[in-house]
Amino acid sequence: MTLLQVEGLGIDFGGLRAVNDVGFAVAPGEIVSVIGPNGAGKTTLFNMISGVYLPGRGKITLDGRDVTGMAPNRLAERGLSRTFQNLQIFQRMSVLENAMTGCHLKERGAILSDLLCLPSSRRRSAVTKARASELLERVGLARAAEHEASSLSYGALKRLEIARALALEPRILLLDEPAAGCNAVETEEIDHLIAEVAKSGVAVLLVEHDMKLVMRISNHIVVLDRGEKIAEGSPATVSRDPRVIEAYLGTQGAEAGHALG
Amino acid sequence: MAELLQYLLSGVTVGAVYALVALGFTLIYNASDVVNFAQGEFVMLGGMISFFAWQAGIPLPLAAILAIIATASVGVLLNKLAIEPARGAPVASLIIITIGASIFLRGGAQLVFDKQLHRFPSFSGDDPIRILGATILPQSLWVIAGAVAIFLSLWLFFAHTLTGKAVLATANNRIAASLVGINPNHMMTLSFAVSAAIGALAGVLVTPITLTSYDLGVAIALKGFAAAMLGGMGIPAGALAGGLLLGLIEAFTAGYVSSVYKDAVAFVVILAVLFAMPQGLFGRKAMDRV
């Protein structure tokens, strides 16, 4: 069963073919990683899937429905949420408030009762707050809940973004370098967190440079180089693929194979 | 003493109008980073549409509501036809677009209405109310009450409703807002509508005191802009404080120095703010992380 299907996806920036003819599929509960050298088009691919860029070619289907070029807010309603490599955080809100915004779509309130601060509104707000706190706990940020987001370190903000993305209760989660800027302990925590999320039936699409993390948790790996898909398969297959080794480390393959394995 | 009180009362009245105009600037600035120089035209439209609807035989309260709704629609159109299509252009270009829109609206009002000064009757008569030797017009009380009501309901809206918080979230970070399922374009449209409606309301309230005409927008936009800068652009509380402060400075200058210099006050305030504290009274110094 496929949740997300990408076919022949491509985009050009001026004369540059940033991404060309990329296709793969993600099933619920599966962790699929997209890897490749810097500038291979991984983030561009993510931006197209999540509606930030309008794809020049190809098709994206979510749950059998064509969602190519759909705006991020409508994709959020359909259960796709993501994090950014270079962070998109509400800097002037507290950490807790950032997580609470993720519950936005689950909240329904009458404007009038909200304006009058009726008990029903306060109860709803309390439920959201509890849910957001729980998620902060899960990503290890409970103690920073009341701090302003802009005061957090890069690694902590990455985890805050994950908490906010999870607050949407997505069916597919796109994580753009979740472990960047995290120390070894934090990386391991993120590793567990991703595995847990996938186990609960959420599809995870991952861009990550930490090869140990990728090889450990991925069910399936897609390798990009210069905008094209050069290999695809299980971690074991991909790490032995000569073209992958070449793309990463040039032609002296023997050592490279060792490094990837 | 009576003199001081008199200046105080007239300063607060004018200040309330400036505060409403500054609030209009603030809302659109927050939603789009654009300083909307057509804000003064919203005030003009509020007064002019009410007057002509009233003259056509529509009862004044109804005419006022009509004017507010019509002006809000103009605000929405301004966003949809002029700002949204240019989304992605540098902010300076967008600001120039609003200057163009302001000239367009002024010209349009001249054609659709006329070039005369207009006034409709005060809501509760024109008999001044005496307070400790000073006087205040009943209409001034309407202006002050209107401003208080608007600020209070907007504060409730932003602090307590989901839609209000969604507007704030969009102001804070557009991409992040759309990631959590907020449609940033809807929030922009809403901000323009509310901002135009507030401007129109200010126009309706103030017309019996200051009269209205097609070209009133420029001066009022300038004053409102000065007030918003003084309080700190983008901060509703700053708009309130800046508006009142500017109104008071103006009234005291007119009273104790000379009424000739009254209109120069706003310029002096803009310059002083830019020199001494560009972030305004309530603003925070911007600091980039490196």
Image (cartoon, coloured by chain):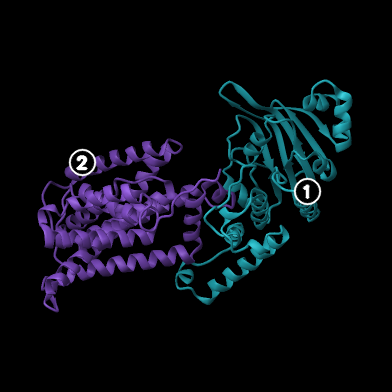
Chain colours: A cyan, B purple
Q: Which residue is mark 2?
A: B107
Nearer to us in this view, A226 or B247: B247
Residue A124 occupies which quadrant of the picture? bottom right
At mark 2, the secondary structure is helix
Which chain hosts label 1?
Answer: A
Residue A209 occupies which quadrant of the picture? top right
Indicate the amino acid at tag 1. Ala
**Of discs 1 and 2, which sits in the foreground?**
1
- From the viewer's perspective, is A82 left or right of B274? right
**Quarter the N terminus of chain B occupies:** bottom left
**How many neighbours does mark 2 have within 10 angstroms: few (below 14), some (14-19), or many (20 or more)?**
some
Residue B130 occupies which quadrant of the picture? bottom left
**Quarter the C terminus of chain B occupies:** top right
Q: Which residue is mark 1?
A: A184
Residues beneath discs 1 and 2 located on the same chain? no
Which chain hosts label 2?
Answer: B
Q: Residue at x 87, y 29 (%)?
A: A257
Distance between mark 1 and mark 2 Cα atoms: 65 Å
Place of residue A15 in the rendered image (x, y in percent of width and height, measured from the top left): 58, 20
At mark 1, the secondary structure is helix
Place of residue A194 in the rendered image (x, y in percent of width and height, measured from the top left): 77, 51
Place of residue B4 in the rendered image (x, y in percent of width and height, measured from the top left): 15, 70
Place of residue A196 in the rendered image (x, y in percent of width and height, measured from the top left): 79, 55
Residue B117 seen in this snapshot: yes
Q: Which mark is residue A203?
A: none
- From the viewer's perspective, is A60 left or right of B156? right
Q: Residue at x 65, y 58 (%)?
A: A167
Indicate the amino acid at tag 2. Gly
